[in-house]
Amino acid sequence: MTSNLWHRSQAGKQACLVSIAILLLAGFCFSQPAISLSTTSGPPTTVLRVSGSGFAPYAKVDIYFGTGDKALAIADGSGSFSQIAMQVPASALPGTHWVSAVERSGQNHSQVRFEVRSDWDEFLREDMKRFNPYENVLNVNNAGSLDLKWSYATNGDLGEDSPAVANGVVYFSSIDDNVYALDAHTGAKLWSYPTGASVQSSPAVADGVVYVGSNDFSVYALNAHTGARLWSYATGGEVYSSPAVVDGVLYVGSGDGKIYALDAKTGADLWSYATGGAVDSSPAVANGVVYVGSDDDTVYALNAQTGADLWSYATGSYVSSPPSVANGVVYIGSWDGNVYALNAQTGAKLWSYLTQGLVDSSPAVANGVVYVGSGHNMYALNASNGVPLWSYATNDYVWSSPAVANGAVYVGSFNYYLATVAALDASTGATLWSTGADSLWGSPAVVNDVVYVGSADDTFYAFSLKHDRQVGGTAGVAQQPKAYGDSYR
């Protein structure tokens, strides 16, 4: 009797296990293929890692970006693969694209969206050069067709500051005491935050936070999505300097003569370094070193972790120009009229070039050339030796810091009566485009085929090409090797 019960129990267990196995097998056989990406947005040339599941066991799976076959994955026995490397094409236009995984048998496929988007997230960009290497729409051949895309009116001068553009949002400051966030595509206002005084510091954006200085002697951290204040830090002077955020640390100068390093998450003071004059220059941070100018006529290099003085270089006047750093060289202007190239490790002068006016503009560095404004001119200098390559007479004063993208230099100029933004051929200095509008003298940001710039007429402007921005196809796979179409904008 006991033996029969035991055998029946075992048989029941076996039947149950068989049923579970059948259900699991059925689920496996009919699971839908799915893929995921290591990141869902980024600029052209981004390296993606593609993972997938739900494909046929040991299937060969082609990975596409748009309609281009970019990689091959071999599924394992469970129909999965992981971390297949694929590079976004350098020619990929801003907007939504599809990444597809297609079995060569044609039986299974899956798709996910990838947003091609570049950011200009702080005054100098992350490359510390005011150079956007990812722009692939605006160029020397079509910049002449730039036209107004949208504008947004504030209640105050936007000065020579530069906007930040990140995650489809443009952030800028105004002397009407506010920091603004607008939809970068439409110009619709998302939020504004009032500080206690005029804001003449360019915003920086990192990890979902907007950082900016104010003339109320404070540095602010704002939620990038809502504008809510996360923290603020009081300095001893007006903060014209634009923050740089690197590895979780915010670096900024103040009118109290100090350079501050703050914890970007909490605002806690990590260190400060006192110079002999106001620090209106915006710091550049490269290879663990903070480079910044001061109104005590000096350029400083400080250890980014400790604030220790590594070297300093004396010029002949104020240094409010934000430095750029490229290939082991610090490029910076001074009110003594010179552009200086200093060895980034030692501070030794490599060369200097005397312009025809004070240099408040931050140099932009691209493809072995330094572009900088001074007096009524824009200059292009050989980055290795300072030899002038060309100059462009604006007839207006160039306080603006130029931006370089895809063979063109964009810069604003101002003479208190008329101000314009111009696009110049980076190789020759020839004029490609000029707004012909009043008061556009800010420092442009050029990203995702749009030129963003602030104005002394209390208005923020976005310029783009005149064309239909929908250039893609339909979404769907008809048969291998066709893949999902892309939609541009």
Image (cartoon, helix red, strand yellow):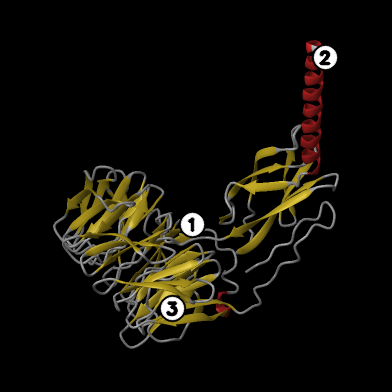
**Foreground residue, 377 or 417?**
417
Amino acid at dot 2: Asn
Residue that numbered label 1 is attached to? 367
Q: Can residue 339 be seen from the camera position used here?
A: no
User: Could you say whether the residue bearing mark 3 is in a helix, strand or loop?
Assistant: strand
Instruction: Determine contact: label 1, label 2, CB under 8 Å.
Output: no
Q: CA distance from mark 1 to mark 3?
A: 22 Å
Q: CA distance from mark 2 to mark 3?
A: 94 Å
The residue carrying mark 3 is: 421
Q: Is residue 375 above or below residue 2?
A: below
Q: Residue sitting at 63 percent across and 52 percent down?
A: 88
- Residue linked to disc 2: 4
Tag 3: amino acid: Val
Give residue 489's position: percent from left, percent from top. 62, 69
Q: Does the image show residue 84?
A: yes
- In the rendered image, residue 33, in percent from the top left (x then y), is placed at 74, 46
Q: Earlier in the sequence, mark 2 or mark 3?
A: 2
* Element type where label 1 sits in the image: loop
Q: How far across and how far down the image is residue 453, in percent?
A: 43, 74
N-terminal of the two: label 1 or label 3? 1
